[in-house]
Image: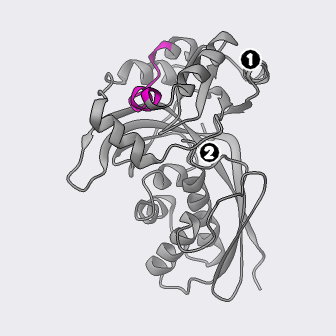
Amino acid sequence: MSAPVREPAPAKVNVFLRVLGRRPDGFHDVETLVQPITLADGVEASEAEGLLVAVAGPEAAGVPTGEENLAARAARALAETAGVPASARLLIAKQVPVGAGLGGGSADAAAALRALNDLWGCGLPAEDLAAVGARVGSDVPALVLGGPVLATGRGTRVQRVSVARTWWAVLPLGFQVPVADAYAWWDEDGETGPEPESLLGALRAGMVEAAAPLVFNDLEDPVTRRHPQVAEGRERLLEAGALAALMSGSGPTVVGLCRDGRHAEEVAAAVGGIAASSVGT
């Protein structure tokens, strides 16, 4: 019997999120810089008869364990691609808030792909795993690769990018925003943000303070109009000394960009949030 395989499942921050428009298939074309962060779930894959999913941890409430679970869907997609039985037990340790714009479910699916690729001996390279992930969810390919990526299309075309490490104070707001709602609200009254070249240039050069005023999220204003708590959270982070603050992904979590680890700890402590840094840079 093979030993269990464990993989971290880092949440993500969108350093910028540019929405380009609605596609004929109902998704939206986007351009975004995704950075995985140290706030993470964990996934353990072990041998079993059939496909079983168990969820534990402080954020486990409400996470499905059936066919709608993204990690389970990822497992079946990988089994189909590799021509192997979809037989494993997936144990997901949930630390990332659900429906918070931090990509927790997608991170779990990405970690499941990496773990099962090892457990089942599939031998697929990361780029092929990302292609499998694209069949599961828009954020999955970006999180399969384990480091910062530029994601385009509906989020499934990903390219590794070398940018500075960043530190964040993460402030979950205690409610959920469905992804479909956030994009529908953008359709109603959202706008497309600026070209990101200056922001990317600053981050490639390691100039985090120069990058701070350039971060943005096109979904933020539409979500904030329906949930003013987002703006209140941003103001709390800025008042606590964050260099910049924005909503992550489809929200509602807000994140504050910080100078370094100590600064992130100070800002997070001031607002009751979580200090984190990017990983895989």
Amino acid identity at mark 1 = His
Q: Which mark is residue 263?
A: 1
Q: Image check: 68 left or right of 26?
A: right
x 57%, y 12%: residue = 209
- Placement of 219 over or under 235, stated as above or below: below
- Residue corresponding to mark 2: 11
Q: What colouring does the structure picture have?
A: one colour
Q: Amino acid at mark 2?
A: Ala
For the point 49% across and 55% down, the residue is 140
Extreme left residue here?
Answer: 24
Q: Is residue 221 magenta?
A: yes
Q: CA distance from mark 2 to mark 1?
A: 20 Å
Looking at this view, is 10 or 145 the one in front?
10
Image position, residue 12 (x, y; %): 58, 41
User: Measuring 58% from the left and 55% from the top, which residue is drawn there?
Assistant: 105
Q: Which residues are magenta?
A: 213-225
Which of disc 1 and disc 2 is earlier in sequence? 2
